[in-house]
Image (cartoon, rainbow, N blue to C red):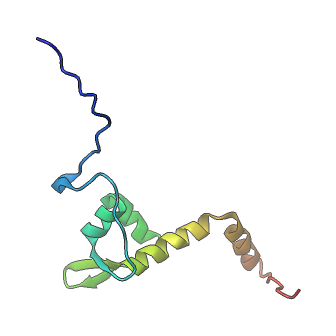
């Protein structure tokens, strides 16, 4: 008996439910259930909890929880701003009570 090899190239991993193994789009005009937001962002439950601790605002309606696309994008942009070197310099100036002079 001959061993079969598959030379058709790399396969994309599939997640539960047959969805593709890559994140989907987040729209500022949409409201997402928590599970859908996590799926689109490729986040685990632990990553979502960490995002909430770091400032992601969640809407609660009864027993259901939602997040707006606008909030997800705001949160991700805030993380980017926190990570940029110029933001930390600006934070240090603010913490020291210094202000920036914008006069030319």
Q: Position of residue 71 (x, y in %)?
A: 42, 79
In percent of the image, x 24 and y 48: which residue is there? 14
Residue 38 in percent (x, y) is at 31, 64
Q: Nearer the viewer, residue 12 or 17?
A: 12
Marks counted in the figure total 0
> Residue 47: horizontal and vertical position, in percent?
38, 60
Residue placed furthest toward the front: 8
Q: Answer left or right for 78 relative to 23.
A: right
Q: Relative to the observer, which residue lies in front, 54 or 37? A: 37
Q: Quadrant of residue 10?
A: top left
* Quarter occupied by residue 42: bottom left
Residue appearing at x 25%, y 67% in the figure: 35
From the viewer's perspective, is 26 left or right of 101? left
- Residue found at x 80% / y 82%: 100
> Residue 53: horizontal and vertical position, in percent?
43, 69
**65, above or below 11, in the image:** below
The residue drawn where x is 26% and y is 54% is: 20
Residue sitting at the far bottom: 103
Q: In this view of the protein, which residue sits in the foreground, 32 or 92?
A: 32
**Relative to 54, does residue 59 appear above or below in the rendering?**
below
Question: Residue 55, can we see it?
Answer: no
- For the C terminus, the quadrant is bottom right
Q: Residue furthest right?
A: 104
The residue lying furthest to the top in this view is: 1
Quadrant the N terminus occupies: top left
Residue 44 visible to an observer of this rendering: yes
Question: Looking at the rendering, which quadrant does residue 4 occupy?
Answer: top left
Tell me if residue 39 comes above or below residue 98 in the rendering: above
């Amino acid at each position: 008996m001959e061993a079969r090899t598959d030379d058709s190239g790399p396969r994309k991993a599939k997640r539960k439910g047959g969805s593709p193994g890559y994140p989907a789009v987040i729209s500022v005009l949409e409201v997402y259930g928590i599970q859908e937001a996590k799926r689109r962002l490729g986040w685990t439950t632990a990553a979502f909890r960490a995002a909430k601790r770091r400032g992601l605002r969640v809407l609660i309606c009864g027993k259901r929880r939602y997040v707006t696309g606008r909030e997800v994008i705001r949160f991700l942009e805030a993380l980017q701003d926190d990570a940029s070197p110029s933001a930390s310099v600006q934070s240090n100036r603010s913490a020291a009570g210094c202000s920036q002079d914008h006069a030319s």
